[in-house]
Image: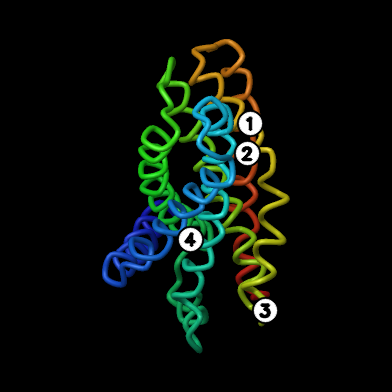
């Protein structure tokens, strides 16, 4: 399973490196969302600093949808998914590999967005490690949930519009917990921030486990 996961993740990341879709489309989209939010809130630095965690995670969630759509678009050619199934690759490995590839892209996006809120919103962290742990757990959960629902909608003609409707409500706990954890990381309130990790951790664990168990049947129905 792990070997298959590495193969699938390597395949997806190599395709992204060659096409540069994530670099030239997804990352600029995420930054644009952040800039537009800043314009909407106005020039008040205190308002921007207060809203920064929520705006950051909204941009990450929108980027997750785009990255997931791209992950399945590269296999939308006729017979591509059938070839992947016939290759004898473990479905759990396919799920983990695609989730890992999406997670790597999300990490890159979050690094850029993190720099963006520091520059645009004048944010300073009192407990940077808390923000990093929250981001890691949230990234795992978002990637796993995105790939799972991406597989569910992959075989449908309306997958581009259906995927956001499936994913965004499901990942609302990540938006809430991630925003609160980042707010605590900025203010330095470690105790209150650590309590929100108890939501992000189980969320990631549940979706990783469900994806490993159900990705095979979802592949068969896609």
Image disc number at residue 169: none
Q: Residues within 10 Å of mark 3 (few under 14, many from 20)?
A: few
**CA gap, disc 3 to disc 4?**
18 Å
Picture residue at 63% right of the left edge, 53% below the top:
213
Q: Residue 169, relative to residue 159: is it above or below?
A: above
Residue carrying label 4: 67
Quadrant hosting residue 116: top left
Q: Where is residue 98 drawn, in percent x and y? A: 46, 59
Q: Where is residue 217 drawn, in percent x and y? A: 66, 66
**CA gap, disc 3 to disc 1?**
31 Å
Q: In the drawing, does residue 26 fall left or right of residue 15?
A: right
At mark 2, the secondary structure is helix
Residue carrying label 3: 156
At mark 4, the secondary structure is helix
Pointers 2 and 1 in contact (C-beta within 8 Å): yes
Q: In the drawing, does residue 113 fall left or right of residue 44?
A: left
Q: Residues within 10 Å of mark 4 (few under 14, many from 20)?
A: many
Picture residue at 47% right of the left edge, 68% below the top:
70
Closer to us: 98 or 54: 54
Q: Quadrant of the N terminus?
A: bottom left
Residue carrying label 1: 177
Q: Which numbered disc, 3 or 1, marks the residue that appears first in the sequence?
A: 3
């Amino acid at each position: 399973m792990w070997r298959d996961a590495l193969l699938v993740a390597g395949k997806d990341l190599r395709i992204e490196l060659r096409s540069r879709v994530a670099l030239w489309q997804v990352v600029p989209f995420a930054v644009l969302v952040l800039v537009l939010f800043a314009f909407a809130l106005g020039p008040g630095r205190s308002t921007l600093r207060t809203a920064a965690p929520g705006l950051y995670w909204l941009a990450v969630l929108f980027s997750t949808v785009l990255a997931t759509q791209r992950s399945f678009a590269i296999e939308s050619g006729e017979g591509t998914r059938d070839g992947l199934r016939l290759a004898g690759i473990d479905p759990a490995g396919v799920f983990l590999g695609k989730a890992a590839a999406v997670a790597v892209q999300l990490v890159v996006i979050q690094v850029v967005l993190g720099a963006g809120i520091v520059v645009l919103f004048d944010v300073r962290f009192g407990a940077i490690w808390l923000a990093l742990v929250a981001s890691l757990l949230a990234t795992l959960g978002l990637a796993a949930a995105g790939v799972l629902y991406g597989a569910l909608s992959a075989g449908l003609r309306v997958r581009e519009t259906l995927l956001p409707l499936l994913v965004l409500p499901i990942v609302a706990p990540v938006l809430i917990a991630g925003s609160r954890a980042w707010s605590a990381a900025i203010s330095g309130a470690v105790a209150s921030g650590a309590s929100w990790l108890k939501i992000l951790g189980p969320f990631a664990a549940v979706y990783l486990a469900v994806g490993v168990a159900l990705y095979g049947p979802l592949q068969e129905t896609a």
